[in-house]
Amino acid sequence: MPGVPRELAEHIIDVNKGSKPVKQKLRRFAPDRKAAIKKEITKLMAAGFIREIINPDWLANPVLVEKKNSKEWRMCIDYTDLNKHCSKDPYVPPRIDQIIDSTAGSALLSFLDCYSGYHQISLREEDQSKTSFITPFGAYCYKSMPFGLKNVGATYQRAIQTCLGSQVGRNAEAYIDDVVIKTKEPGSLIEDLEETFKNLKAWQWKLNPTKCVFGVPSGQLLGFLVSN
């Protein structure tokens, strides 16, 4: 997955001047969690989202949480130490209630889910080593924007709204990695979808087809946003 062009979005980790890097020690993991870490690293390496790194200044640990409706583990990285030393991006994303209000009068709604949304945005090269994490199989850092970092939500929201352009507020809304297409009249559904896909394709966004839904009654919006 090539990701969106850097001219659209590139995440920058703005560490405060004078901050002292923190290196966490490797934690112990039970065999099932250790296997889950290995599986996730293999997947992330194959996708080109991470790379191996030697002797980084910052070093965090993986955290494993159970996936919804599954006994499988999801791997996240504990960036608490790094986030403490980063400046806050003042960009404010929209609230769910505002998005729901904006769909009033729509006959049909369509929902698009961006595949591994955050990973479609690159990290600035000189900041990649700051995302380093230690595992029983070595140390790695992200090449793409990972979950858990401060300000990644703002970077993503800014990027997707720039991509959709004049559609935002007219026939589309974006909430993090979910895009809602608002169709006023059933007959214009295809036209609204075509405009949206044209904008997404222009900036190389990739969608998860298993989580996309088209032409449903507007009353289902809240349930979609909450479930995702």
Image (tube, rainbow, N blue to C red):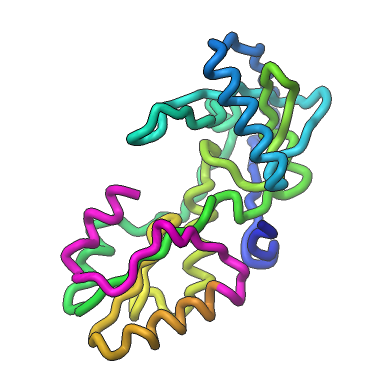
Residue at the image position 38 percent from the left and 83 percent from the top: 192
The picture places residue 76, in percent across and down from the top left corner, at 53, 31
Question: Camera-side residue: 32 or 86?
Answer: 32
- 79 versus 3 height, above or below: above
Residue at the image position 24 percent from the left and 61 percent from the top: 221
Position of 167 with respect to 21 (left or right) is left
The answer to which image quadrant residue 111 occupies is bottom left
- 46 versus 225 height, above or below: above
The picture places residue 92, in percent across and down from the top left corner, at 41, 55
Residue at the image position 49 percent from the left and 24 percent from the top: 64
Residue at the image position 68 percent from the left and 21 percent from the top: 134
Q: Please count the marks in the image.
A: 0
Position of 223 with respect to 169 (left or right) is left
The picture places residue 147, in percent across and down from the top left corner, at 53, 40
In reply to whether residue 217 is colored magenta, the answer given is: yes
Quadrant housing the N terminus: bottom right
The answer to which image quadrant residue 223 occupies is bottom left
In reply to whether residue 206 is colored magenta, the answer given is: yes
State the extent of the magenta-drawn residues as a range. 201-228
Question: Camera-side residue: 72 or 96?
Answer: 72
Position of 26 with respect to 63 (left or right) is right
The picture places residue 104, in percent across and down from the top left corner, at 18, 73
The answer to which image quadrant residue 60 occupies is top right
Spot the residue most to the right: 54
Spot the residue most to the bottom: 187
